[in-house]
Amino acid sequence: MIQKTITILCSVLLYSLSFSQEKPNEKTVLQELSENACKCADSISLSNRKKEDIIKDVHGCIDKYTGALQISTLLKGAEKQSENVKEVNGKKQVNLTFNTNKDSKQYKDSYNEIERYLMQHCESVKRATTTSETSYDKFSKNQTALDFYQKAVDASKQENWKDAIQNYEQAVKADPKFIYAWDNLGICYRRVGEYDKALNAYKQSLNVDPKGKMPLQNIAIAYIYKKEYQKAIDAYHDFDKVYPNDPEVYYGIGQIYFTHLKDNEKDLTISAKHTESTMNRNLLTDLTQKL
């Protein structure tokens, strides 16, 4: 068990740690922390918001887990330091400096590691960083619905999911065709583990706009949370019918086979398609920019 003593000196914390023989796997730690940051980003509302505010929320999700990665990196470096330290009661004690200053190299290195991982593996972050401005045709013209919607957005920022759900429900009651309210209601239900209600909200959104990308994506994710993996795969195929060759389809299905169904062969096949699709999309973007 790790024991620690903390002394605060301005923005620097000094940790005194004792190490057991078990060493953390840095790659696994990075993956786990990044996946938690990805889940955080998955709950970021993209509608009726300025792009800069969305990006700020993404940074907040990364920042939330940066400190833990800093500590993990320090623990790895302490192994070399401990070689020159004498044992006391069978343990070696090493002082580590954990810098909480966000302008420090230590913080920036860990932050950038998580950010790079997310940009490669987290579709929620990719979607948030590339999202366009609000589509006002998906908004309501009903002032009562808009008032409830704004209250729900404010509650969501405080992670008060109960109040957010109540206000989103009132918003769609006032305007049953309020697409963004249905979409965000689904996200809030998923946050509290009400996956069936989340699915219903996404489907209500699709009844208004059958091509809604956000609900099509999140139906598959909701089924993953329910551990109904075949339904999740089917949902990704439905998504592919509306948005052919979207990389998220191949990535999502590949993750299901690799992480949940433990079918590495199918995962490699799907991943190859994902890579090809991404390359084709990047090539098309490059060609378009040159025209």
Image: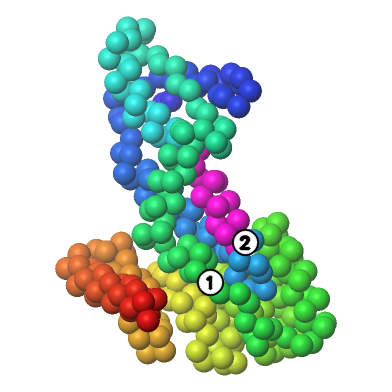
**Is residue 94 found inside the magenta-colored segment of the image?**
no
Residue range highlighted in magenta: 54-69
Marking on residue 131: 1
Q: Would you identify the image quadrant in which residue 175 lies? A: bottom right
Looking at the rendered structure, which numbered label has been put on residue 52?
2
62 part of magenta stretch: yes
Q: Is residue 185 visible in this depiction of the protein?
A: no
Query: In the picture, which quadrant includes the N terminus?
Result: top left
Above or below, 89 against 174 in this view is: above
Q: Residues within 10 Å of mark 2 (few under 14, many from 20)?
A: few
Q: Position of residue 69 (x, y in %)?
A: 44, 39
- In the picture, residue 273 is in which quadrant? bottom left
Q: Earlier in the sequence, mark 2 or mark 1?
A: 2
Farthest front residue in view:
291
Which part of the image, by quadrant, shows the C terminus?
bottom left
Amino acid carrying label 2: it is Glu
Q: Nearer the viewer, residue 145 or 53?
A: 53
Identify the secondary structure beneath mark 1.
loop
Query: Is residue 27 at all visible to an observer of this figure?
Result: yes
When the figure is inspected, residue 10 is found, relative to residue 192, above or below; the finding is above
Residue drawn 31% across the image and 39% down it: 25
Q: Secondary structure at mark 2?
A: helix
Instruction: Please give left or right for residue 78 compared with residue 9 in the image.
Output: left
Label 1 amino acid?
Answer: Thr
* Residue plotted at (71% across, 78% down): 169
